Amino acid sequence: MLRAGLIGFPASGKTALFQLLTSAREAPRPSGKQEANVGVSRVPDERLDRLTDLFKPKKHVPATVEFADMGGTGGVRAGAAALLDVAAFRNADALLHVVRMFRDPSVPHASGSIDPARDVRTMEDELILADLGVVERRLERLERDLKKAGNNAELKKELELLQQCKTTLEDGRALRSLDLSGDQLKMLRGFQFLSAKPLLLVLNLDEADLPQAGRAAELAGLQDFVSGARTRAVPICAKIELEIAQLEDADAKTFMADLGLAESGLDRVIRASYDLLGYISFFTVGEDENRAWSIPRGTNAQNAAGEIHTDIQRGFIRAEVVRYDHLLARGSIAACREHGELRLEGKEYIVVDGDVINFRHAT
């Protein structure tokens, strides 16, 4: 399951967005502990809906995204450092920064004015400072260990890499900007650096700005920022999303059509989170259950089988694969087999977004 942590300054709409995304009915109550509120959102996928119409299974299970929210602590000074002690944020695959662009005199901004570019830079600085503290402490420990261990090759590699990280952070650049090799990424994985995580800016617009939603990053002065490595932006209007969430499906569709919206902002946030990490979906179908499974792009068939169950991965024999559009056009797996559209693939086959797969495995 993809995991994302919501961060943002007070009065940005962060906790309201968390409630909308996860269908939480009440705002989280402070407990005095550094704990995250965690909820799950379904990934909207019309393909799964159509496959369900075709197979009419007993169960329909979409892919999911887990969101974590820290209430008001995610944007105050030292808030980013506090997130390092919270497992839901430390283990998050990506961070979603909810950025206030809406204008409402009854909800004052803590800094006295609405300036999304300032808020984004300030939050980025917090993430960088939190990571810099981790790097400096580890470097001190490494230097002591090297004096004891002498010419330890692995410790020297880690020292060189962390010195590169330290220079980057001291220059005011996030670690996600570094172009690192697979071995280097593996070496840093245990630190779970906040500024190394992919970042999605959720631009919370004023209702009056919806017609210009496509230019939101430009209007906020964030074009250069979102052009950075593993950084994207998606516009929403939380006020409108709240109204949509309170409507029946048919009324919601009519309301969105009147506003010129093809889909809800919540769906766009979930899709953008999914795409930011390069995730794709494959499907399993049958009379009992149709399900969408999330995997990183480039995953081979045997590892994809492990998403379903480790026993299937260990006992992997072959994958029966058919493209979603072929299955939908033919109407059944049997018809796809007759037309040569059902393929047998080995363990190294790279799964493609939209593959419908049946895994053959030894029990």
Image (cartoon, rainbow, N blue to C red):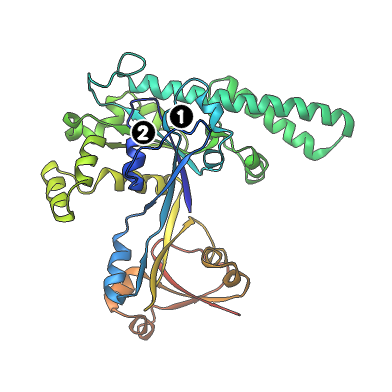
- Image position of 246 (left or right of 8): left
250 over 342 or under it: above or below: above
**Disc 1 marks which residue?**
74
Question: How many C-alpha atoms fall within 10 Å of the one at disc 2: few (<14), some, or many (≥20)?
Answer: many
In this orientation, which residue lies closer to the viewer: 49 or 69?
A: 69
Q: Position of residue 277 (x, y in %)?
A: 46, 46
In this orientation, which residue lies closer to the viewer: 37 or 233?
A: 37
38 over 249 or under it: above or below: above
The label shown at residue 14 is 2
Picture quadrant of residue 338: bottom left
The residue that appears at 82% across and 27% down in the rendered structure is: 144
Q: Kindly check if marks 1 and 2 are in contact, taking CB atoms under 8 A apart as contact.
A: yes
What's under tag 1, amino acid-wise?
Gly
In this orientation, which residue lies closer to the viewer: 339 or 26?
A: 26
The image shows a total of numbered marks equal to 2
Q: CA distance from mark 1 to mark 2?
A: 9 Å
Q: Earlier in the sequence, mark 1 or mark 2?
A: 2
- Can the viewer see residue 237 in this picture? no
Q: Secondary structure at mark 1?
A: helix
Q: Position of residue 303 (x, y in %)?
A: 57, 63
